[in-house]
Image (cartoon, rainbow, N blue to C red):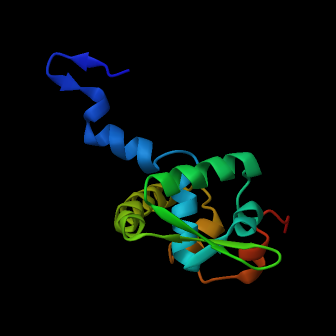
C-alpha cells in the first residue's frame, strides 16, 4: 500500500528505495564479500557470517531480483553455484566504502573494537586466511 502525504509519496522516495534495496542486516556484508572474492559460493557465506541458510537464501534471492548479483549454476556433479556482482552491484561499492570508512574512523575514535574480517574486506588489514576461512574460531 502506498502512503501519500500531500504530494509526498514515501514509497517512491529514493532514500526508501536505497534502504529497501541494499540496507538490511546482511546485504552489505554479502555484497562486500562477493566483491572481495570476485565470485562466491553459498558455503563461503555460511562459514564467514553468523547467518542461517534460510536467511542467506532469501537475501541472495532478493539481491538477484534487484539486479545486484547474478547467480551462475554449473551443471556439474555435485552442482556448483557461484554468485558475482552485476555492474549495478559494483556501482554500490563506492557508497558502501564511504559508509564503512565513516564507521571505521568513528569506532577508532571511540575506542571500539573493530571486526578483523570486515577490515580485511575493506583493506584496513592484511588478508589472514586463518580468519577468512573460520572467523568464528576462538583465539
Residue 48 appears anywhere in the view:
yes
Residue in view at x 67 percent, y 52 percent:
57
Camera-nearest residue between 22 and 71: 71
Residue 26 appears anywhere in the view:
no
Residue 47 vertical placement versus 131 (above, below): above
| Residue that protrudes farthest toward the top in the picture | 6
Residue 133 vertical placement versus 69 (above, below): below
| Residue that protrudes farthest toward the right in the picture | 138
How many tags in the picture? 0
Q: Is residue 122 left or right of residue 44?
A: left
Residue 14 vertical placement versus 94 (above, below): above
| Residue that protrudes farthest toward the left in the picture | 7
> In x, y percent, where is residue 50?
74, 53
Quarter of the image containing the C terminus? bottom right
Quarter of the image containing the N terminus? top left
Residue in view at x 52 percent, y 45 percent:
24
Q: Is residue 138 left or right of residue 106?
A: right
Q: Is residue 50 left or right of residue 15?
A: right
Residue 73 vertical placement versus 105 (above, below): below
Camera-nearest residue between 47 and 69: 69
Splitting the image into 4 quarters, where does residue 128 fall? bottom right
> In x, y percent, where is residue 98?
36, 62
Splitting the image into 4 quarters, where does residue 9 fall? top left
| Residue that protrudes farthest toward the front in the picture | 75
Residue in view at x 72 percent, y 51 percent:
51
> In x, y percent, where is residue 109?
46, 57
Residue in view at x 37 percent, y 71 percent:
87
Camera-nearest residue between 131 and 23: 23
Amino acid at each position: 500500500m502506498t502512503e501519500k502525504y500531500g504530494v509526498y509519496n514515501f514509497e517512491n522516495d529514493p532514500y526508501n528505495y536505497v534502504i529497501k534495496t541494499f540496507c538490511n542486516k546482511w546485504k552489505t556484508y554479502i555484497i562486500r564479500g562477493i566483491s572481495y572474492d570476485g565470485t562466491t559460493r553459498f558455503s563461503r557465506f555460511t562459514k564467514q557470517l553468523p547467518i542461517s541458510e534460510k536467511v542467506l537464501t532469501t537475501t541472495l534471492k532478493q539481491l538477484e531480483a534487484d539486479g545486484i548479483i547474478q547467480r551462475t549454476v554449473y551443471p556439474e556433479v555435485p552442482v556448483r553455484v557461484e554468485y558475482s556482482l552485476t555492474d549495478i552491484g559494483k556501482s554500490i561499492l563506492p557508497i558502501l566504502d564511504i559508509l564503512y570508512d565513516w564507521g571505521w574512523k568513528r569506532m577508532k575514535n571511540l575506542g571500539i573494537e573493530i571486526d578483523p574480517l570486515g577490515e580485511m574486506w575493506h583493506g584496513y588489514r592484511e588478508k589472514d586466511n586463518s580468519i577468512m576461512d573460520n572467523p568464528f574460531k576462538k583465539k
